[in-house]
Every structure is written in C-alpha cells, then in structure tokens.
C-alpha cells in the first residue's frame, strides 16, 4: 500500500492545499465534491503534484515539511512553471 502527499491548487483563492492520504483517487474526488472542510469553499481545485511513499511515517513527515517555509520554497522550484501562471504562494 502506498501513502500519498498531494498538492491542490485553488482557482478561487490562487493558493495551495497540502494533504496526505492512502487513497489518492478517492481523496481527490472528496475534495472536488466539497466533502473536505478545509477545501469546500476553495473550489474549483486541481491536483498539481503528488508523491508516493511505501511508509506512512515517511509520507506524514514529508507532508509536514512541505507545509513549512522551506517546503513551500521547494515546491516553488519543482513546479515553478505552473506557479508562474497561476499562484501567489
């Protein structure tokens, strides 16, 4: 089983959401349907990045890192072309 860290882009507020799940398709569907409290008012959203891990603890640590300033700087570098056109993070 894989565990995923994923990044969503909100077209409403031009920001990002960083999350964790063990079932990426189901979780993205929940976000799109408005069933996730933290993103229900930020739709429409797009999945713009994800990473998969075999170990849950590794995935959770990665999620926490990406939520830091250093992590957001890392994200800006690896998906810079997307952010140049879409985001204000």
Image (cartoon, grey):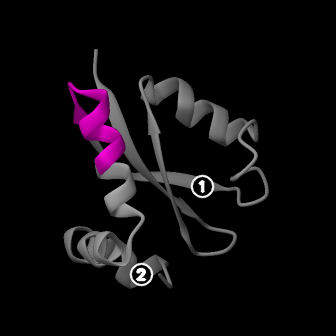
Q: Residue furthest top?
A: 1
Q: Main secondary structure of the magenta part?
A: helix
How crowded pointer 1 is (Cα within 10 Å; few <14, some 14-19, many 20+) is rated as many
Looking at the rendered structure, which numbered label has been put on residue 45? 1
Residue at image position (75%, 36%) is 35
Q: Position of residue 60 (x, y in %)?
A: 36, 42
Query: Is-magenta flag for residue 86?
Result: no
Q: Position of residue 37 (x, y in %)?
A: 76, 46
Helix, strand or loop for disc 2: helix
Look at the picture and state if 55 lies above or below 49: above
Look at the picture and state if 29 lies above or below 51: above
Mark 2, residue position: 85
Q: Position of residue 34 (x, y in %)?
A: 76, 41
Query: Is-magenta flag for residue 60?
Result: yes
Residue at image position (27%, 68%) is 79
- Is residue 1 left or right of 46 when viewed as pictured? left
Helix, strand or loop for disc 1: strand
- Is residue 87 left or right of 41 when viewed as pictured? left
Looking at the rendered structure, which numbered label has been put on residue 34? none
Q: Quadrant of the N terminus?
A: top left
Q: Earlier in the sequence, mark 2 or mark 1?
A: 1
Residue at image position (55%, 31%) is 27
Q: Splitting the image into 4 quarters, where does residue 12 fall?
A: bottom right
Residue at image position (34%, 35%) is 4
Magenta stretch: give its range: 52-61
Q: CA distance from mark 2 to mark 1?
A: 15 Å
Q: Is residue 10 visible?
A: yes
Look at the picture and state if 18 lies above or below 16: above
């Amino acid at each position: 089983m894989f565990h995923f860290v994923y990044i969503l882009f909100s077209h409403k507020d031009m920001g990002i959401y960083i999350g964790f799940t063990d079932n990426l398709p189901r979780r993205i569907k929940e976000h799109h349907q408005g069933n996730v409290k933290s993103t229900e008012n930020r739709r429409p959203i797009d999945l713009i990045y994800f990473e998969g891990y075999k170990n849950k603890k590794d995935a959770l640590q990665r999620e926490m890192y990406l939520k830091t300033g250093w992590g957001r700087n890392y994200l800006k570098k690896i998906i810079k072309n997307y952010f140049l056109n879409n985001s204000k993070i």
